[in-house]
Each structure stands twice: as structure tokens, then as C-alpha cells.
Image: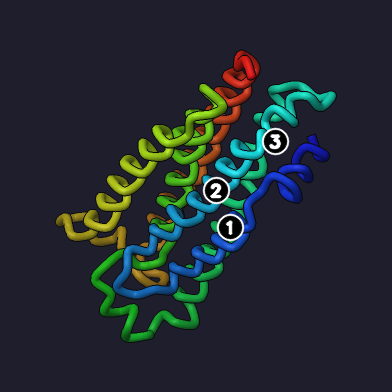
Amino acid sequence: MRNLLFKEMKLSASILSYIFIAFGLMFFLPGYPILCGVFFSCLGIFQSFQNAREANDLVFSALLPVSKQDVAKGKVYFSCIIELSTLLLMAIVVIVRMTALADSPVYLQNALMNANPFALGVAFLLFGLFNLFFIAGFFKTSYKFAKPFVTFIIVAFAIMGIAEAAHYIPGFEALNAFGFANLPLQLGLLAAGVVCYIVLTWLALRNAAASFEKTDL
């Protein structure tokens, strides 16, 4: 499995998968829907899957002395590395904004979602949904990726819209708390997002492996 993962990272991956990790820095942007950084990171992973399909990477990998299930798992693990790298960058930005930049007027007057643990929890959820809808969806055919990616886009932007608007609903103002206000609630929502990511990714891993095992290349 380790060799398969190295193959994914060094041979199959698009350079955009690595470059688009930097979109995690969008959490620094005031007055902008910061969760779009998740979409761009997923778009980088999408490019790796597109490159792999055009280069017949799956056929090549299936001919290696490894199980087809491990081939699918290797791509899921690679995707998780990109996602967690982006999430780490986002987490660093959240800490900086909650501490060193907590008194910055540009953030205090921000009309959109603040970079806080709740936003990070939603980012975990979105990455988990990407794994379930796109990666597991792709391996249903191991060829068609437009429909699962469009499905993810629709679901993801609907959730982004809800998350952005939630703090305007009376009683939900704490979701957009800045600094260390309402920190226990924020951390609880972050933990919920992490749990969702783990569960959704596990489902994606299981479904992708099972589907690819049945695929006739």
C-alpha cells in the first residue's frame, strides 16, 4: 500500500493537486465566502483523477501485483493527504485570525463567515462529502467523473450557502463568533465536522474498493 501511495503522489498526481492546497489560505480573505477554498482543493484532486483516466493509470495499476481494492484505496488515501494538508493550512489561518488578528477591523466588520472552528468543521464535512460523492461515485464506473463531480458541486455549494447564512438566523449568531467567544460551542461543531469526515471517508473507501473490484477494465 505504501508503494501504491508513493506511485499516486509521484506519478499519477497532477501538479495542480499540490498547488491548490494553497487555496486553504482563502480563510484569510475578509468579505469572501472562505469555504470556496475547499472547492478549489477538491478541483485539484479532480485534475489528478482526470489525468489518471486519460493516461489509463487505472489499467496500469490493475496490472501490478496488487489487488484492485488496494488500487482504489491508494487513490482515496492520496486524496486524504491533499485534503488534510489543506485543512492544516486552514487550521493555521483560523488560529492566526483568532489570536494575532483578533482585533483587526477588517475581520471585525466581516459580513460573511468568519474563520473559526465552526468554519473548519464545515470544511471537514465538505471534504468528506467530496470523498463520498465524487471518489466513490467515480469508481462506480472507473471512467465517468463528470456526473459525480457535478453532484458534489451542487451539494457542496448548497451547504456553503447554508453555512454562510446561518449566523443571520436569530439564535444562531454564535456560529459566526470571532476570537474566543463561544469557543466550547465552536469546538463542539468542529469535532462534529471531524466525525462526519471520518465516517464519510470510510464509506467512500469501502464503496470505492468494492466498486473497483467489480469493474471490468
Q: Tell me which amino acid carries mark 3.
A: Gly
Task: List x then y, in percent, for residue 118.
Answer: 39, 56
Q: Earlier in the sequence, mark 2 or mark 1?
A: 1
Task: List x then y, in percent, for residue 167.
Answer: 23, 59
- At mark 3, the secondary structure is helix
Residue at 40 percent across and 51 percent down: it is 122
Q: Contact (CB < 8 A) between labels 2 and 1?
A: yes
Q: Quadrant of residue 154?
A: top left
Q: Tell me which amino acid carries mark 1.
A: Leu
Q: Considering only vertical position in the picture, is 30 above or below 55?
A: below
Gap in angstroms between the C-alphas marked 3 and 1: 18 Å
Q: Contact (CB < 8 A) between labels 2 and 3?
A: no
The N terminus: image quadrant: top right
**As rendered, which of 195 and 157 lies closer to the eye?**
157
Q: Earlier in the sequence, mark 2 or mark 3?
A: 2
Please rate how many residues cluster around mark 1, counting C-alpha atoms within 10 Å: few if below 14, some from 14 to 19, many from 20.
some
Residue beneath disc 2? 47
**As rendered, which of 104 and 129 lies closer to the eye?**
129
* Left or right, 15 with reference to 145: right
Residue 16 numbered tag: 1
Please rate how many residues cluster around mark 3, counting C-alpha atoms within 10 Å: few if below 14, some from 14 to 19, many from 20.
many
Q: Tell me which amino acid carries mark 2.
A: Gln
Residue beneath disc 3? 74
Colour scheme of this structure image?
rainbow
Task: List x then y, in percent, for residue 176.
Answer: 30, 63
Report how many numbered discs are placed on residues in the image: 3
* Left or right, 118 with reference to 25: left
Gap in angstroms between the C-alphas marked 2 and 3: 16 Å
